[in-house]
Amino acid sequence: MSGLGLEHVIPSIGSKELVATLAHHLGVGPGDTVVFPELAYPTYEVGAVLAGATPVATDSLLSLGPTVPALLWLNSPSNPTGRVLPVDHLRKVVDWCRERGTVLVSDECYLECAWEAEPVSVLHPSVNGGSLDGILALHSLSKRSNLAGYRCAFVAGDPALVAELLAVRKNLGLIMPGPMQQAMAAALDDDAHADEQHAVYAARRASLRTALEGAGFRVDHSEASLYLWSTRLVDGVEQDCWNTVAWLADRGILVAPGSFYGRAGNRHVRVAFTATDDRIAAAVSRLS
């Protein structure tokens, strides 16, 4: 993101409030359509509904037919699947949105939590052709720097869209307090702690994945993010997510049912490796 000026960036009080309010703050409303992935963080849909727009969950732009969305969300790396979209795909979505005047917002909160892929931001020239027109990218320090309680996040991109957000948000009092801005600046200026945390997550992920696969699970995607997108197999048959939730709960392991993130997730669970090392070790022991 080097080369971005103050006119390209605005801090937000955590990423969730921005996801929930961004459509409304950009003037999206009744009669408009907001598109987001089939398997997605529920707040994309919540934000569309709060704005009075029509939410559409799809991974196929062809399925939209003649509908031109006012706003389209990307999420790479994905929550919950950990899937990383390749540069060619990102570039095609950017071009598609620009041809139609659709605002493209990419949720990149897990960009630095990669294990088996190299995620690329829509802010990179290889994706956007050197222009930020019509593009915004959302980032959070909750994952990179363990600053969830500090509510440190920001959105960057098209200066015209950033100016519009600033004009609305400052009148609503949605201004990140100064001490949090200082903490965010300090964290972004220090890569060492982020590298150390990355190594901690990598070790937790490796042990948990081995234990899950040993217990009869298949892990899909999960090349990035802080989750293992997993399905339990019994005699080769994928189990319903709620049955898997119950099976794991009987062993003292709490996971999120995939159906929380869309109907396409009803055979998966989202297994987080954000617990402490002791709790991860306990889960591994119970799975073994």
Image (tube, rainbow, N blue to C red):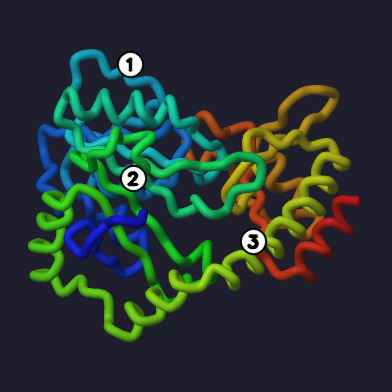
Residue position marked by numbered label 1 in the rendering: 63
Closer to us: 191 or 283:
191
Q: Quadrant of the N terminus?
A: bottom left
Q: Nearer the viewer, residue 153 or 268?
A: 153
Relative placement, left or right, of 232 versus 257 is right
Identify the amino acid type marked 3. His
Q: Quadrant of the rendered structure where residue 121 is? A: top left
| Count of numbered circles in the view | 3
> What's under tag 1, amino acid-wise?
Ser
Mark 3 — residue? Answer: 198
For marks 1 and 3, the one nearer the N-term is 1
Q: CA distance from mark 1 to mark 3?
A: 38 Å
In the drawing, does residue 221 fall left or right of residue 219? left
Q: Nearer the viewer, mark 2 or mark 3?
A: 2
Residue visible at 71% across and 56% down in the picture: 202
Q: Nearer the viewer, residue 121 or 249?
A: 121
Measure the alpha-carbon separation of dots 2 and 3: 23 Å
When the figure is inspected, residue 265 is found, relative to residue 95, above or below; the finding is: below
Mark found first going from the N terminus, 2 or 3 = 2
Q: Is residue 211 above or below residue 286?
A: above
Q: Residue at x 49, y 33 (%)?
A: 85
Give the residue at mark 2: 123
Where residue 189 appears, as percent x and y from the top left, is 45, 72
Which amino acid, mark 2?
Leu
